[in-house]
């Protein structure tokens, strides 16, 4: 039976016969003996296979090149060489699949991340992407753990939606109509009654509005699913398809919400430090020497809580030249957020009480008539990692805002019903999963923390 390399390296099976299967990272050696570094994805570490050339024959070993896949039986022994604790003395090798050195793109180490994006179908086989993808997995698991332990329910919000009023971003349309010859009304507009759902539909930009329905019944819920935004924003922090975690909690106010966000982030960061040690240390060594320190710092320090109005004052008095101007009412840019976090406070910041004009209609309105109880969590290197708010629970106030904004509520009547029937104070937020993975891996481009990034003009893989 196959043993995973991660388990073999623990050493407890030493001096027994084992079977291992994996992909060859390198083969080196001399006339008598070959050393194969084998990886099976279970750990960043390879196991060394020692091959007696006389026994297997030079011809047999030739196709065992970088990228090929082999099945090895052998004896697990304490290693005589340096750099590994155990190794396998091969007794039988089967070649599952070769990888022609003339065409296999991952011959050498040290390819640029840009190059690897062009071979996204193969990049999971590199040390870097192996590490990132394992961390991604452990973080997903940690997130479910965290909320499950708190008694929150995993709530499945829909991916296709007919509501168009959240305003979180431009949407991708979903249709089965023939785009070359769509049915038309007399006024020349497309007749959506003939479309699959009988009305225009889109991919969701957020599960929040449905999540609120869940919270008004189950108390505390969270969503964790893909979300889609069609903005043409080609930045290192935006994807057209990204995963979002959105807890929504009845009877929470904005302070409870901030406490939840802080404790949640600290839990998952702590979980990663504990369960992804080898991978994080690898990424720290290769890409970002301060990574582990930064993660520990966030874990150990209380996040600063700062009202938008105060934040703007600090930015105005900073004496710093920003590309985008700062003034009360401005939607803060990443450069402003990062100044506050990285230079001024040198600590994560939760900014609250934003001008209502720059935030969504559903945020709870403050007494001042100008600001709303929104909150963004701002992180070093990332900027906004979480966006959320206490929600406006009062039907009339919510409708006033809807009317001020001239929003059509035709497709959102069901959302407003929550405020009609047993409304309750509640709050929630959205964590961008890839931004979290960026932070924890120390990667700098969001395209490098999801297996198959969706960005403008990019759906090859
Ligand atoms: O701030 P946003 O737009 O908030 C919402 O969608 C709310 N409905 C959340 C809620 O209150 N339940 O998005 C939330 C987070 C951002 O802070 C950011 O981390 C991430 O989602 N995000 C993106 N991540 C990658 N690519 C994009 N295009 C993103 N847009 C937002
Ligand atoms: Mg936001």
Image (cartoon, helix red, strand yellow):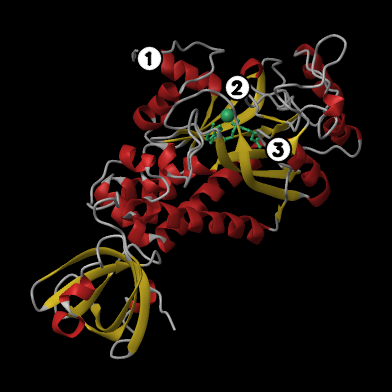
Image coordinates of residue 212 in percent, x first then y, are 76, 40
Residue that extends furthest to the right in the rendered view of this protein: 421
Say which mark, if any, is on residue 215: none
Q: Is residue 399 above or below residue 268?
A: above
Residue that extends furthest to the front in the rendered view of this protein: 59
Image coordinates of residue 399 in percent, x first then y, are 83, 20
- Residue picked out by circle 1: 322
Looking at the figure, which quarter contains the N terminus?
bottom left
- Residue picked out by circle 3: 208
Nearer-N-terminus badge (3/1): 3
Nearer-N-terminus badge (1/2): 1
Q: Residues within 10 Å of mark 3 (few under 14, many from 20)?
A: many
Nearest to viewer (mark 3 / mark 1) = 3
Left or right placement of residue 173 versus residue 458 in this view: right
Left or right placement of residue 20 versus residue 140 in this view: left
Number of numbered callouts drawn: 3
Quadrant of the picture in which ligand 1 is shown: top right
Q: Is residue 2 above or below residue 114?
A: below
| Depth check, front residue: 98 or 326 | 98
Image coordinates of residue 380 in percent, x first then y, are 40, 36
Q: Quadrant of residue 23?
A: bottom left
Q: Judge: label 3 CB < 8 Å from ligand 1.
A: yes
Q: Residues within 10 Å of mark 2 (few under 14, many from 20)?
A: many
| Depth check, front residue: 451 or 446 | 451
Q: Residues within 10 Å of mark 1 (few under 14, many from 20)?
A: few
């Amino acid at each position: 039976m196959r043993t995973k390399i991660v388990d073999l390296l623990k050493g407890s099976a030493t001096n027994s016969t084992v079977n291992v299967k994996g992909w060859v990272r390198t083969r080196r050696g001399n006339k008598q003996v070959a050393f194969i570094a084998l990886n099976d994805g279970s750990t960043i570490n390879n196991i060394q296979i020692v091959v007696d050339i006389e026994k297997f024959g030079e011809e047999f070993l030739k196709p065992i090149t970088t990228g090929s896949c082999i099945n090895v039986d052998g004896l697990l022994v304490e290693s005589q060489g340096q750099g590994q604790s155990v190794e396998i003395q091969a007794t039988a090798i089967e070649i599952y699949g070769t990888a022609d050195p003339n065409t296999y793109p991952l011959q050498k180490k040290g390819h640029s991340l840009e190059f690897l994006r062009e071979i996204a179908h193969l990049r999971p086989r590199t040390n870097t992407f192996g590490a990132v993808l394992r961390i991604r997995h452990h973080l997903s698991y940690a997130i479910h753990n965290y909320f499950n332990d708190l008694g929150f329910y995993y709530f499945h919000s829909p991916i296709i939606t007919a509501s168009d009023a959240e305003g979180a971003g431009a949407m991708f349309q979903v249709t089965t109509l023939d785009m070359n010859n769509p049915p038309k009304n007399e006024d020349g507009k497309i007749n959506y009654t003939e479309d699959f759902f009988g009305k225009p539909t889109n991919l969701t930009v957020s599960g929040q509005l449905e999540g609120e329905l869940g919270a008004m019944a189950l108390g505390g819920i969270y969503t964790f699913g893909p979300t889609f935004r069609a903005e043409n924003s080609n930045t290192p922090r935006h994807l057209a398809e990204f995963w979002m975690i959105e807890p929504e909690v009845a009877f929470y106010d904005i302070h409870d919400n901030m406490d939840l966000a802080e404790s949640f982030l600290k839990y998952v960061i702590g979980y990663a430090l504990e369960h992804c040690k080898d991978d994080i240390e690898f990424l720290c060594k290769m890409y970002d020497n301060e990574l582990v320190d930064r993660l520990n710092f966030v874990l150990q320090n209380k996040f600063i809580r700062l009202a938008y109005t105060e934040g703007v004052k600090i930015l105005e008095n900073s004496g710093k030249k920003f590309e985008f101007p700062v003034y009360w009412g401005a939607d803060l840019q990443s450069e402003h957020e990062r100044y506050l976090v990285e230079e001024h406070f040198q600590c994560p910041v939760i900014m609250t009480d934003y001008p209502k004009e720059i935030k969504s209609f559903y945020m709870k309105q403050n007494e001042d008539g100008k600001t709303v109880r929104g909150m963004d969590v701002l992180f070093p290197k990332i900027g906004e990692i979480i966006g959320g708010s206490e929600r406006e629970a009062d039907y009339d106030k919510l409708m006033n805002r809807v009317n001020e904004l001239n929003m059509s509520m035709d497709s959102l009547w069901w959302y407003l019903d929550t405020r009609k029937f047993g409304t309750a104070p509640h709050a929630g937020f959205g964590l961008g999963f890839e931004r979290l993975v960026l932070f924890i891996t120390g990667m700098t481009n969001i395209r490098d923390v999801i297996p198959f990034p969706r960005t403008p003009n990019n759906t090859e893989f």
